[in-house]
Amino acid sequence: MPTLNHYLLLSAVLFAIGTAGVFVRRNLITILLSIEIMLNAVNLTFVAFGRAMGSADGQIIVFFVMTVAAAEAAIGLAIVIALFRHRESLNPDMFTQLKW
Amino acid sequence: MLLLIPLLPFVGFLLNASFGRRLSKAAAGAVACAAMAGSFAVSLAAVWSLLAKAPEARVVTQTFFSWIASGDFSVAFALLLDPLASVMILIITGIGTLIHIYSTAYMHEESDSEFARYFSYLNLFAAFMLVLVLGSNFLVMFVGWEGVGLCSYLLIGFWYQKKSAADAGKKAFIVNRIGDVGFVLGVLLIFVRFGTLDFQEIGRSLAPLAPEMAFGTISVITLLLFIGATGKSAQIPLFVWLPDAMEGPTPVSALIHAATMVTAGVYMIGRNALLFGHAPRTLAIVAIVGIATALMAGTIGLVQNDIKRVLAYSTVSQLGYMFLAMGVGAFGAGIFHLYTHAFFKALLFLGSGAVIHALGGEQDLRRMGGLKNDLPITYWTFLIGSLAIAGVPGLAGFFSKDEILFRTFAGGHVLLWTVGLLTSLLTAIYMFRVVFLAFHGPSYTHAAPEHPAPQHPAPGTHLHDAPPAMAIALIVLAIGSVFAGYAGLSGRFERFLEPSFTVVQDAGGLQAQPTPEPASDAGLETGLMAVSSVVAIAGIGIAMFFFLRKREAADRVARQFGGLHRVLEHKYYVDEIYDAALVQPIHIVSEEGLWKTVDVRVIDGAVNGVADAVRGGSETLRRLQTGSVRAYAASLFLGVVTVLGYYLWR
């Protein structure tokens, strides 16, 4: 029978994978996917706490997060497409014009 | 009604200043003259109603509004008419009107707008001068005091395209500022000491006090006020501006720099006779400065070649006489000389203006001569003025100058009297030097071919005498120069002024203020009169010998005392000394110290240094902004981890 700690541990692992993906991968779409993984790690934590405390609040917040994540994905992908049209590349290191 | 006196010229100023451009010369001149004449009429009426009162009650104060009220300090805008002020307003408006009329002819060659500008300044001057003499407290007086200084500056520099005129205006203004610092400090100290700036209240609080024998507050106050007077009235050490002020139009010299403004210092001492009377130490200084100035300016006047400069030094010298009178406590005699001097010095200046006008701008005495027949009106009026200033018996200057010398002698100041007499001799010599050089002797204009002077009318052209507007002013002033002195016969003038120099009590009664009554020794007075008459006539004789009979003798004397002559010609090098001792050091300190060190290094250095430091720091710090989004995200993440870590493991 998995306890709360198991869920939290899984969530932490997912979050770490997502973070590592954001920093390590050189493809904008992969980075966006990594961000989704981090968001879902957080969602998992909410749901786990909600169940452990016998309340529906955690699940409600997850729905909010999912809505925002959907919007974020739409905008993020739009930006990625715009960037690709501009530079023919998805490598974030190519986009360093916004500096001194 | 009192307000109307300064207000009329002020309205004239506003009209000419606002619409002058569109007015014809005749209209602009008429507005200005009408304003002055109206003011003169109101003054006459005001003085007439004053005369109707008993001598002790001859004070009219009119408060118009409370000007400044702040805690203990309250000043009303109030005007005061008493015998002293009435003499002054009659001089200012009367002689002012004549000079306005004269100016309409003298300034005729100016363009319409310049003409209106000239008259607007002249009217503004009259308004301020009237405020000065009518003000019933120091602050109102100060408004006029500064206002006339401003107008003096504007009028000296009237021909501002000429650099020397613009410079002379600045010099007058700056030198006057130096004096004004003393004046303002004196006024502040008066407030600290007496708690009021009202002349009559100061007098009332002074009345019970004994004169200050030691050097105390009142001495300091009066000394500071006197510094202001030396600036305004061109006394040592601040007299240097007046001769340069002759760059202005000649009627201006007559009105401002002879008859009215420069006498403001004398008036101010007369107005505060009680205050100065309580400071015998200051009075002694006033007398010494006065007589020293009189002698110094008189000697310089002997050798100057510019006709207006001779008159300017003569003015300085006569003002010295007035201060001598003030210094020996003969306030009435000083004001009496101020009054007669206004007539004959205005006359002399206007006469010299007529000469300059006739010669097309020539001011050098060496280029004049033989004008007697060409300019008869100018000649005769100028001669009367010269006789009056020299102190020939029967004319105005004789009575007033003699009164001063008599009071000096009677006061026991024999040394001052001797120097005064010597100055009187000098006065006669330099004035008649001008008369003989300009009007007698060989005609320069007829001998012109040897020394071509392009600005002269061609040789043989008929020189025109003063046009009617100028002639009227000359003749009226000449009549005044003859008869003005009779107002002072047997001390009538001084008795009239006496209430102004004492305290008026609340009920209008006179506080018995013991003024040192001179020993009315008729024999002594007659003897001294005879001495000064002889001196005056001797002076004229000396001038006649040197400048009419034997001009080469004058040149020989000048050569023999070459060193002295040079010193006098260079006005004792006072300008050069001031330049070396004050102007140049200030210049050097300002340029090398304040400009090139303090401003450039310290102030600019601090400002630029801060900017440079910020830029240098930013140069390094901006490398942090790489533009790489992932680097930003990494720092964000690290930051969150750090903050969370801190709170978790605290």
Image: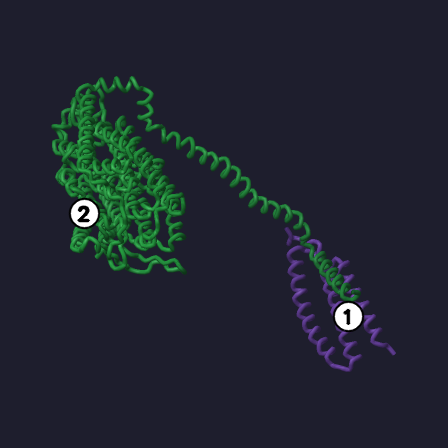
Chain colours: A purple, B green
**Type of amino acid under label 1:** Ala
Location of the N terminus of chain B (image quadrant): bottom left
Residue drawn at 17 percent across, 56 percent down: B53
Question: In terms of secondary structure, where does tag 2 sit?
Answer: helix
The residue under label 2 is B33
Q: Quadrant of residue A51?
A: bottom right
Q: Quadrant of residue B332?
A: top left
Badge 2 sits on which subunit?
A: B
Residue B399 at x, y = what percent?
18, 38
Position of residue B73 in the picture relative to residue B320 (left or right): right
Few, some or many C-alpha atoms within 10 Å of disc 1 (few <14, some 14-19, many ≥20)?
Answer: many
- Which of the pair B87/B96 is nearer the observer? B87
Residue drawn at 82 percent across, 74 percent down: A7
Few, some or many C-alpha atoms within 10 Å of disc 2 (few <14, some 14-19, many ≥20)?
Answer: many
Residue B506 at x, y = what percent?
27, 59
Location of the C terminus of chain B (image quadrant): bottom right
Question: In terms of secondary structure, where does tag 1 sit?
Answer: helix
Residue drawn at 58 percent across, 46 percent down: B611
- Reply above or below: B496 against B573: below
- Reply above or below: B623 against A10: above
Q: Which mark is residue B495?
A: none
Q: How many marks?
A: 2
Outermost residue, right side: A1
- Which of the pair B375/B455 is nearer the observer? B375
Discs 2, 1: same chain: no
Distance Cα–Cα, label 2 vs label 1: 100 Å
The residue under label 1 is A41
- Reply above or below: B184 against B402: below
Position of residue B89 in the picture relative to residue B467 (left or right): right
- Which of the pair B103/B78 is nearer the observer? B78
